Image (tube, grey):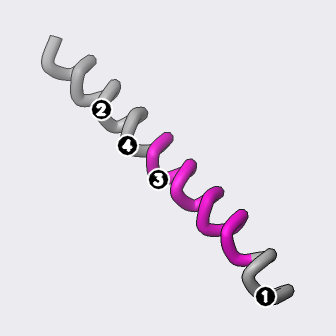
Amino acid sequence: MPEDSDYPPLLFRQTMLIQQGAEVAHDCFAGLKQ
């Protein structure tokens, strides 16, 4: 299935970006609380 070979990497990249954004937001909130 060639379609599936293209799908997971894109999904993986999106997940990585979401996780990165969550970590950055968490750091920002932690910095504001201090």
Look at the numbered discs 4 and 1 and tell me whether their residues touch, using CB distance below 8 Å. no
Look at the numbered discs 4 and 3 and tell me whether their residues touch, using CB distance below 8 Å. yes
Amino acid at circle 4? Ala
Front disc: 3 or 1: 1
Instruction: Please tell me which of labels 3 and 1 falls first in the chain.
Output: 1
Q: Residue at x 70, y 77 (%)?
A: 7
- Identify residue for label 2: 26
- Identify residue for label 3: 18
- Residue situated in front as seen by the camera: 33 or 4: 4
Q: How far apart are the two marked residues, 3 and 2, measured between alpha carbons?
A: 12 Å
Q: How far apart are the two marked residues, 4 and 2, measured between alpha carbons?
A: 6 Å
The kind of secondary structure element at disc 3 is helix
Residue 14 lies, in percent from the top left, at: 57, 61
Look at the numbered discs 4 and 2 and tell me whether their residues touch, using CB distance below 8 Å. yes
Residue 1 lies, in percent from the top left, at: 81, 88
13 inside magenta stretch: yes
6 w.r.t. 1: above or below: above
- Identify residue for label 4: 22
Amino acid at circle 1? Glu
Residue 28 lies, in percent from the top left, at: 32, 28
